[in-house]
Amino acid sequence: MRGRSVTRTQSGGRNGGNGRFLRSLFMDAPLYAPSSTEATEAVAAPEAGGPPPVAEPPVAEPAVPPVAAVSGARAGRDRRAEAHAGLRELLLRGEFDVRERLVEVRLAERLGVSRTPVREALVRLVADGLVERRGDGYYPARPNLDELRDLYELRITVELRGITRALESPRVTHDLTLLAPLRDRWRALRAQPPAPDPGFVAWDEDFHLTLLRASGNPRLTETLESVTRRIRPVRMYDYLTADRISATVVEHLEIVELVLEGRLAEARDALHRHVGDSLEVVEERAARALAQQALRGHRTPVPDGHRQVAARHRTEENP
């Protein structure tokens, strides 16, 4: 389900151009798997600027809803979509501290909508894994490094199974109509790499979900979607430097090209290395970010697991 992004740079500079470039690449590819509520809305909601929905007319007395009623309903859906997309992008960009309560009034002013679409967006973002509900309101989801390794183990198992099942049975083949366009999009990203941005996690998720979906087992894809939602607040830290963006693009292309060439054993090994390397980077960067927040004087203590990870990386860097 697409929504309009918050205001972006309109100049011809690198960041603004990259934003438009990424949107053009992935215009027809889902950034994440919609929930059942989103899927229902996606069917019911017309594209912005498209023809208004027309009610099914009774057999005996054909009728069309008043134009004002149709326009009002479409505008309401557009505002909900805009609020969800705008707030989601702000969260993915790390605009809010994890200890900052997300106040409806302030968010509505920032996004240029009323409080109702913001309230609905917050509920949906809880399901997306980007927001959590606490006793006194909504907050950005806190990275949880204590369970990160368990979730990554599950992620690796599920993703590798998508390739392994094709190795085990000649009757299982990957859907090339999904993989060829995926390869082409990432080739374009290699030619014009985007600037470092936590929001790049959405493109990474799309790659892994599409690769697994092409293996033909929807239950595996559903499991990966669930894991993805839970690790997303931590994985955002994977894309803060140009070298990580570049490495991700190169590794994704290696994996999808190997699958397309039928070199499945090599593809599985490359995928295993890729996900494992990502865990190390995410864990390190998230631990550093949480440690920096604590040093800035935030009252909430950093969990022991986070301290242990940060201390380990400091020891490795300064033996």
Image: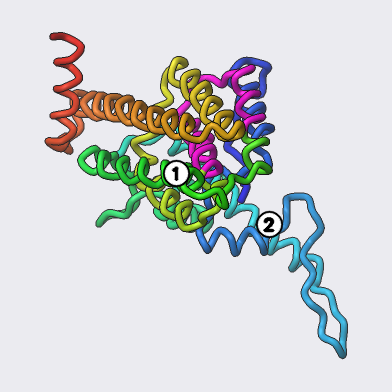
Residue 201 in the image: state x and y as whole percent.
47, 34
**Residue at left 33%, top 44%?**
141
Q: Secondary structure at mark 2?
A: helix
Q: Which residues are magenta?
A: 183-211
Q: Residue furthest top?
A: 319
Q: On the image, which quarter does residue 193 sit in?
A: top right
Q: What is the three-letter code of the residue carrying label 2?
A: Ala
Q: Residue furthest bottom?
A: 60
Q: Is residue 23 above or below residue 76?
A: above
Q: Which residue is mark 2?
A: 75
Residue 191 in the image: state x and y as whole percent.
64, 17
For the stretch drawn in magenta, the main secondary structure is helix
Q: What is the three-letter code of the residue carrying label 1?
A: Thr
**Residue 199 is one of the magenta-drawn residues:** yes
Q: On the image, which quarter does residue 71 sit in?
A: bottom right
Residue 61 in sight in this render: yes
**Residue 201 is one of the magenta-drawn residues:** yes
Q: Earlier in the sequence, mark 1 or mark 2?
A: 2
Q: Which residue is mark 1?
A: 164
